[in-house]
Amino acid sequence: MVEGQVEEVIFDHLHATAFQYTPLGRTILGPAQNIKTITKSHLQNYISTHYTAPRMVISAAGAVKHEDIVELVKKLFTKLSTDPTTASQLVAKEPAVFTGSEVRIIDDDVPLGQFAVAFNGASWTDPDSIALMVMQSMLGSWNKSSGSGKHSGQRVGINEIAESMMAFNTNYKDTGLFGVYAIAKPDCLDDLAYAIMYEMSKLSYRVSEADVTRARNQLVASNLCTAGQLKSSLLLHIDGTSPVAEDIGRQLLTYGRRIPFAELFARIDAVDASTIKRVANRFIFDRDIAIAAMGPIQGLPDYNWFRRRTYWLRY
């Protein structure tokens, strides 16, 4: 099923080339042959190895008492493995190392080319992770079939050089990926690549406060939230006891603590034009990139072309 979802396949290839020879470069499911040969003993061994007490968070929300939850946990969670190995230790043993590289799969039997270009990003706990979130919103997303279409103001929409594009910012334990995924007709790939690299590189040079304010206070397409709307989105996201419990667990596993909304909102509001330029200089300016492309992509510029456009020659 996953192999039929081209976007999933593109991001699998992107991770494989960006994090070569590291665990993060391997797909979650693995090759199809693995799925077909999985047995009950494989699943039991995996659970006993990785679902251990030191790597688990139990959270609850709603009309519950903390003491009752503690007693239930003591009663029901008695057979968990107590292997002391933590996720941090596993990451330290096999860290994710970013490699500037590319993978291209030419397929002329499909009508559209698609590619993802990414920079090494920030981990969950990196102080600049929030700024990258705002930068993702500044780059935005666009889809030809959306209601606004070419009138959205997006460069790719006005010039009709893409079918769709989407900025992404993925965080992991010790690293991340920041970039853009796009789909276009074969004869538009070079123009689209130029537009994408121009907008990303511009974050290191030319960012106005108005740009940042707009990115923080205006909702953009494809579920990418700007900082102002991000607050409402985050609140809506945890509207209910189950989402609240999930949010508690996620924050404890990624940050090691629960982050108050006031702190998160303050960090978002603290991002300004100078912050964007500093973070862009850290992650984008003259940095190696990873590229994954599939389809009729003969018109997509080569790797050195992309690498050259991670900076501008300005005096």
Image (cartoon, rainbow, N blue to C red):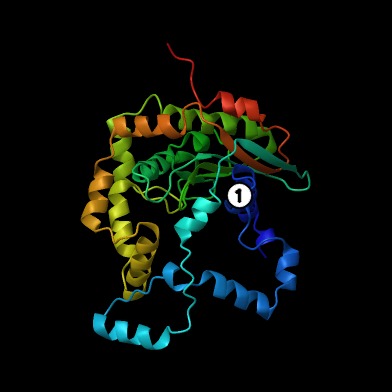
Left or right for 100, reference 299: left
For the view shown, which residue lies furthest in the bottom direction? 75
Left or right for 91, reference 238: right
The residue carrying pointer 1 sits among few (fewer than 14), some (14 to 19) or many (20 or more) residues within 10 Å by Cα, namely some
Viewer can see residue 8: yes
Q: Quadrant of residue 34?
A: bottom right
Dot 1 corresponds to which residue? Answer: 22
Whole-percent x and y of residue 35?
A: 70, 69
Q: Across the whole image, how many numbered discs are drawn on residues?
A: 1
Q: Residue at x 64, y 34 (%)?
A: 189
Q: Quadrant of residue 297?
A: top right
Q: Does 80 appear above or below 172?
A: below
Left or right for 179, reference 257: right
Label 1: which secondary element: loop
Q: Nearer the viewer, residue 90 or 293?
A: 90
Q: Residue at x 48, y 57 (%)?
A: 89
Viewer can see residue 65: no
Q: Quadrant of residue 240?
A: bottom left
Q: Amino acid at mark 1?
A: Thr
In the rendered image, the quadrant that contains the N terminus is bottom right
For the view shown, which residue lies furthest in the top direction? 315
Q: Nearer the viewer, residue 155 or 313?
A: 313
Whole-percent x and y of residue 147?
A: 47, 50
Q: Does 211 appear above or below 17?
A: above
In the rendered image, the quadrant that contains the C terminus is top left
Q: Nearer the viewer, residue 264 or 136?
A: 264
Q: Does 117 appear above or below 40?
A: above
Whole-percent x and y of residue 309?
A: 54, 25
Q: Residue at x 27, y 86 (%)?
A: 68
